[in-house]
Amino acid sequence: MAERILALPGDGIGPEVVAEALRALEAAAAWAGLALEVEFELVGGASIEARGTPLADGVLARARDCRAVLLGAVGGPAWDALPVAERPERGLLQLRRELGLFANLRPASVFPALASASTLRPEVTRGIDLLVVRELTGGLYFGEPRGRSTEAGLRSARNTMVYDESEIARIARVAFAAARGRRRQLTHVHKANVLEVSQLWVEVVEEVAKDFADVSLQHQLVDSCAMLLVRDPARFDVLLTGNLFGDILSDEAAMITGSLGMLPSASLGGGGLGLYEPVHGSAPDIAGRDLANPLAAILSAAMLLEHSLAQPAAAQRLRRAVAAALDSGARTADLLPEAAPGEAGASGEAGALGCRAMGDLVLAELAKLPD
Ligand code: IPM
Ligand code: MG
């Protein structure tokens, strides 16, 4: 029986990178003897244009019937003026929340071939291999009350950062378990010197730690963690964070490895169903021009193989094919030192591969791997 996969290309460079990720996914799945049935649906701005809403009910229902969702990106300048509740991003947040995907895994490591692609010195980036475990369905993103109001002509706005102990404990367990399969070091990131919410996180994480005596636990203030990530990133193994801090620190973690175009993610917790997406956004400035880096999406497909289809060997092949493509010297524009990521001028860089060509190369490297 074929495994059903829902593709949600979304906006900007989403469709380009998802197309490459699907080709790589199908090839790696075929190697494992697995048949896929890929269906396409709309999300984000693309859905707003076609249906007037960033996520139609039917799409959620369809996602629930699938084994996994592969998403590109949402958002763009066309929808920037919309109120928060109607924006493309709301479609993605609803998907995460409605599907119960509370555990967001964002691994960041340095491919040897990209050691010099980072804006940090190679001796600083050497050995970076960390995993951000971000809580994804609570905190400031979803807390009530929220909204805007005007009283006596004075505009104000509020959001609420709220977590209960069960939400903290379940994501802490995911992070501890992940640390167990790695270097057994967990850093909990917080702001407990100011926030009651963070004080509760420290308490609950300490309680969960009792079940994971083999994992060493540290609590790190978020501001100092942001600093340490650029000073000495290799010290970190697993970072456990709430929703907002995880959003910020995962972009930072991605960038120190060389490019935001390299970082994949998996969102789990929804009883077997997983959502996979590159961490980078829709990059509207380079959309539709075959300039995007498809590797984060391809590496997200590898996470899909591992976590949703229980095919770790096929996932590993895909990662090796990506490493081989990079070893051959191939670079998309964002990976070239001269070019700022997403900069249109990067297109003319000598040696810069387009999105499709990089996808072709990964497929070629995949076919070359011994069985
Ligand atoms: C991410 C993105 C999203 C987030 C946006 C697009 C809503 O930045 O996945 O990191 O803030 O979670
Ligand atoms: Mg983000």
Image: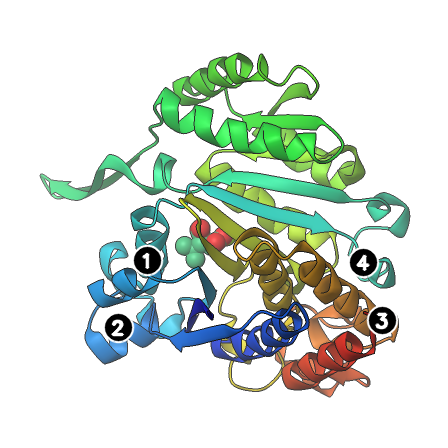
* Residue identifier under label 3: 370
Quarter occupied by residue 26: bottom right
Q: Secondary structure at mark 2?
A: helix
Provide residue 354's location: percent of width, then percent of height: 68, 84
Q: Secondary structure at mark 1?
A: helix
Residue at the farthest right position: 123
Looking at the rendered image, the quarter that the C terminus falls into is bottom right
Query: What amino acid type is highlighted by mark number 3?
Result: Pro
Mark 3 / mark 2, whichever is N-terminal = 2
Give the CA distance from mark 1 to mark 2: 21 Å
Query: What amino acid type is highlighted by mark number 2?
Result: Ile
Residue 64 circle label = 1
Residue at the farthest front position: 1
From the viewer's perspective, is 35 left or right of 64? right
Query: What amino acid type is highlighted by mark number 4?
Result: Phe
Quarter occupied by residue 37: bottom left
Give the CA distance from mark 4 to mark 3: 20 Å
Mark 4 / mark 1, whichever is N-terminal = 1
Give the CA distance from mark 4 to mark 1: 34 Å
Mark 3 / mark 1, whichever is N-terminal = 1
Give the CA distance from mark 3 to mark 1: 36 Å
From the viewer's perspective, is 153 left or right of 283? left
Provide residue 16's location: percent of width, then percent of height: 54, 80
Q: Secondary structure at mark 4?
A: loop
Nearer to us of marks 3 and 2 is: 3
From the viewer's perspective, is 78 left or right of 237? left
Q: Does residue 270 sit above or below 285 in this rendering?
A: above
Q: Does residue 186 sit above or below 108 in this rendering?
A: above
Give the CA distance from mark 2 to mark 4: 37 Å
Nearer to us of marks 4 and 1 is: 1
